[in-house]
Image: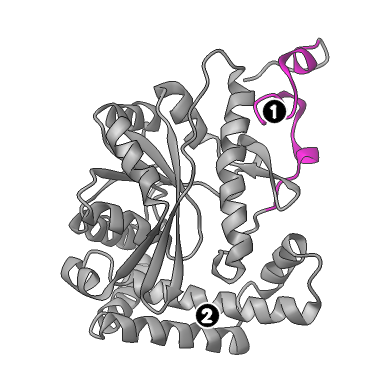
Amino acid sequence: MAAHHTPSARLISWAALTMIFAVTRLPMRWAVALGGGAGWLCSHVCPLRRGLVLRNLAIAFPGQSEAERRRLMRRCYRNFGRWAFETCFAGRVDTVKAGLVVEEEHRERLDRMLAECPGFIAVTGHLGSWEIGATHFAYMGIRLTAVVKPLHNGYMNDHIVRSRRRSGLKILFTNEGLTTAVTGRINRDEVVVIVSDQDARQAGTFVEFFGRPTSTPRGVAMFSVRSGRPILPVFTTRVRGNRHRMHYGEPIWPRDGEDIDQEVRRITQAYTRELEALVRRFPDQYFWFHDRWKTSPGMLKPKRLRRAGLASAQEVDTPEASPES
């Protein structure tokens, strides 16, 4: 995806950077509170994607009443506002260090990984303040590379790259040759963090998420299989205000000699299960604004079934089925 450096992109970036400048003039805890208020106001005045949020909540929590889902939706908007204003401080190292409080759950899992296999993949999702997790890793002195999708707006993209680098993060874009780059960094004992919980259309592997087959990116599992390095699920939730909690899941190791598509599915299901457990604990902190169940297995072409983990090689490699391209 090519970044745009057009006059309209410049105007949008100017407006966004002006807002970021204004927000970062405030103490961080005030900015987070203001963001929550802005999110609450948005949920009542101009609730963008309200229909999609309610539809997602109905799928995830069918036992809730319509009134309960609407109350949950409003809390989602409020938490998203807190995240948006808090993210404005990315790259302002001293401000974030002074204003950020991070607790850790199962820290021994991270310590064990750093001692036994310092180069690994940290997978996370759009839960809580996911940006804070990567920033916290960088502040701990962990050599960290984040895989991110470039923005269409070239000016905003440049700003984000600069701010993340000031925080100690290295950046790899998804439109670059990722396989060699990610494997190389892991083999140099760096940690590569990837957010992997959005719809991957026909290119994904299907795993269960809230009881429904869900297309999920294959990249995290593929990097693990090809490098032989483990995956550590890492998620961040907000406790209150600018206090956060890091959740470290059980490490997931790739297995030798397995069918690669089924192994990718197994690994992806393992960390998706960890994410779902936390989303059930903190449903108002998940990014329900994304159409997570946009792609269903019935939409796949026959030649995509094996790669999606929905059919074995024997079932797919028949005269009627087209070979994997």
Out of 168 and 19, give the one closest to the viewer. Answer: 168
Give left or right: position of 159 versus 256.
left
The region drawn magenta spans 293-318
- Estimate how packed mark 1 is, as few (under 14), some (14 to 19) or many (20 or more) residues with alpha carbons within 10 Å: many
Residue 149 in the image: x percent, y percent? 42, 49
Q: From this viewpoint, which residue is outermost toward the top?
A: 319
Out of 203 and 224, give the one closest to the viewer. Answer: 224
The reply to whether the magenta stretch includes residue 79 is: no
Give left or right: position of 277 versus 220.
right
- Please state which amino acid type lies under the numbered disc 1: Arg
Residue 151 in the image: x percent, y percent? 40, 56
Give the image quarter of residue 172: top left
Chief secondary structure of the magenta span?
A: loop
Residue at 60%, 89% (x, y): give it: 45
Which residue position is annotated with label 1? 304
Give left or right: position of 180 versus 94.
right
Give the image quarter of residue 105: bottom left
Which residue position is annotated with label 2? 78
Residue at 59%, 25% (x, y): give it: 263
The quadrant of the image that shows the C terminus is top right
Can residue 175 be seen here? The reply is: no
Out of 54 and 139, give the one closest to the viewer. Answer: 139
Residue 203 in the image: x percent, y percent? 61, 35
Q: Secondary structure at mark 1?
A: helix
Above or below: residue 255 compared with residue 138: above
Mark 1 vs mark 2, CA separation in Å = 39 Å
Residue at 47%, 88% (x, y): give it: 37
Residue 44 in the image: x percent, y percent? 62, 88
Q: Are marks 1 and 2 in contact (CB under 8 Å)?
A: no
Residue at 29%, 52% (x, y): give it: 137
The reply to whether the magenta stretch includes residue 311 is: yes
Q: From this viewpoint, which residue is outermost toward the left?
A: 94
